[in-house]
Image: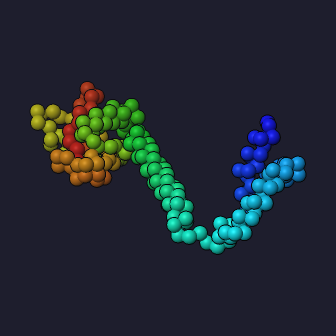
Amino acid sequence: MTMRNDCNIIKDLLPLYIEGIASSDTVAFINEHLDGCEHCRAELEAMKSFDEKDPALYSDKPEPADEALPVRRLKRKLMRRIILTVIASVLLTAAILILCIELKPADIYYGNSEMYTREDMDGAIKLIEEQLGSFEGCKLYSISYTDDRYCQSELEYCNSLSDNGTEYSECIVFVTDFRSPVFGGGSWTPNCRYSWYWYLARTESGVWELITWGVP
């Protein structure tokens, strides 16, 4: 680097040097240059002399309102960015949480049954999931087996609903917890939680039939 280029750099740094806001490394660099450069020493003295004639340029007094305005605008701009970033982060977190909830499979509670195996229950649960899945926009959270005594007591009810004289030999009943479509539609109350009972029955053939569902 030539001396001329060094002088140009020093000239740009002298205002910071005079104000005392230059870093220690910069001050050391300037001092080293000033020791061997008469031209820059003269430039420094000229700047100091100019400052003494117009002390307002480097005084400790607060900036006039019109000079402080750009700083305030910058602060407001930065604050807006921070606020927008926080809001975006909150919305993103909420969206991820909602997505995880919506994609989470339904919980299945088999309970304790001496009448039905899990295989028996899974066959009935599959029919419930298919039917509830046909309700567009609904979200299934859980399916729970009631109990053996309740299922036995509801066999007569299932037979009473048979429209072709079928005599069922077994009844199984589940309770579902699900959410209606967020924006409603049809007869649904928007974004509402429901607990419905699902009645299934089968004959000696061992094939479950979905008999009815809803609030008991």
In x, y percent, where is residue 179? 31, 48
Given the current orientation, which residue lies at the most extreme bottom position? 61
Q: In this view, which residue lies farthest toward the top? A: 205
Q: Is residue 174 visible?
A: no
Of the pair 74 and 142, the residue shown nearer to us:
74
Q: Quadrant of residue 61?
A: bottom right
Coloring scheme used: rainbow
Measuring from the top left, give residue 210's x and y in whole percent. Answer: 23, 36
Of 73 and 59, which appears nearest the observer? Answer: 59
Residue at the farthest left position? 164
Quadrant of residue 15 in the image? bottom right
Q: Can residue 208 be seen in this view?
A: yes
Residue 140: image location, x then y, percent: 34, 43
Q: In this view, does 1 lie above or below 12?
A: above
30 vs 47: above or below: above
Q: In the rendering, at what x and y percent does residue 197 appear?
A: 27, 47
Please give the name of the residue rendered at 27% of the width and 32% of the height, measured from the top-left corner.
208
Up the image or down, 180 lies above or below 118; here it is below
> Residue drawn 52% across and 60% down?
70
Q: In this view, does 53 lie above or below 41?
A: below
Is residue 167 rendered to the left or right of residue 52? left
